[in-house]
Amino acid sequence: VSDRRDPRAPAVWQSSPESRAMLAVRVMRRGGVRAAACPALLHARAKHAVPAWATLDPDAMSAASPAAGQSLVGGEWSSTTATADVIDPLNGEVMAKVPDVQESELGPYIERMRGCPRTGLHNPLKNPERYSMLGAVCAKAAEEMRKPDVNYFFARLIQRLT
């Protein structure tokens, strides 16, 4: 495999992502476009804080410090006896451990399913208050996603897990 660059490609395509981002900012300034119009460029290299409610740091997940998942049953977070490994596709190491619910641990899940009405808990015709409350939750989540640190957190988490 050759280590040489393709002489036909423009030099900027062969440069680092950081230099391409800086070039884009310069081009935007020349064209009269404010850098604020492209927040991704402004935050491309900034260090972002992990949101206070987050239980993991997507940039720190590694074999030395894997993220740990939990199960949510009846509004309570719980651990399981067994876990499944989530492998980092970039290096093949374990980056997270998620619950692997065994047959002997299914009791609380089955109990919660039996307690759920046939039409569901979130049926807008039978439980309009719950439906409105979930709409407010979605609006609050969208508001939260406008924050650069939260936006970065989810973008990095998606990048790491896909």
Image (tube, rainbow, N blue to C red):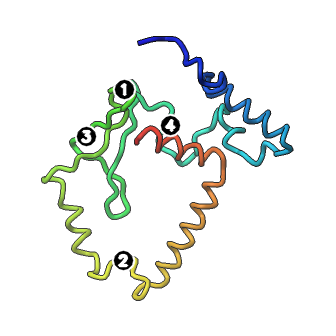
**Helix, strand or loop at mark 4:** loop
* Placement of 77 over or under 85, stated as above or below: below
**Helix, strand or loop at mark 3:** strand
| Residue occupied by mark 4 | 57
Q: Considering only order in the chain, which callout, 1 or 3, is on the residue closer to the N terminus? A: 1
* Placement of 117 over or under 75, stated as above or below: below
Q: Considering only order in the chain, which callout, 3 or 4, is on the residue closer to the N terminus? A: 4
Give the amino acid type for the residue marked by disc 1 in the picture: Ala
| Residue occupied by mark 1 | 63
Residue 99 horizontal side relative to residue 37, left or right = left
**Label 3 vs label 1: CA separation?**
14 Å
Q: Considering only order in the chain, which callout, 2 or 4, is on the residue closer to the N terminus? A: 4
**Helix, strand or loop at mark 2:** loop
| Residue occupied by mark 3 | 84
Extreme front residue here?
8
- Residue 121: numbered disc: 2
Question: Looking at the picture, how far across and down is residue 69, in whole percent?
Answer: 36, 44
Give the amino acid type for the residue marked by disc 2 in the picture: Leu
Q: How many marks do you count on the picture?
A: 4
Residue 85 horizontal side relative to residue 102, left or right = right
Say which residue appears at 64% left-offset and 60% top-offset: 143
Say which residue appears at 24% left-offset and 70% top-offset: 113
Give the amino acid type for the residue marked by disc 4 in the picture: Asp
Q: Are marks 4 and 2 in contact (CB under 8 Å)?
A: no
Position of the N terminus by quadrant:
top left
* Placement of 89 over or under 15, stated as above or below: below
Q: Considering only order in the chain, which callout, 1 or 2, is on the residue closer to the N terminus? A: 1
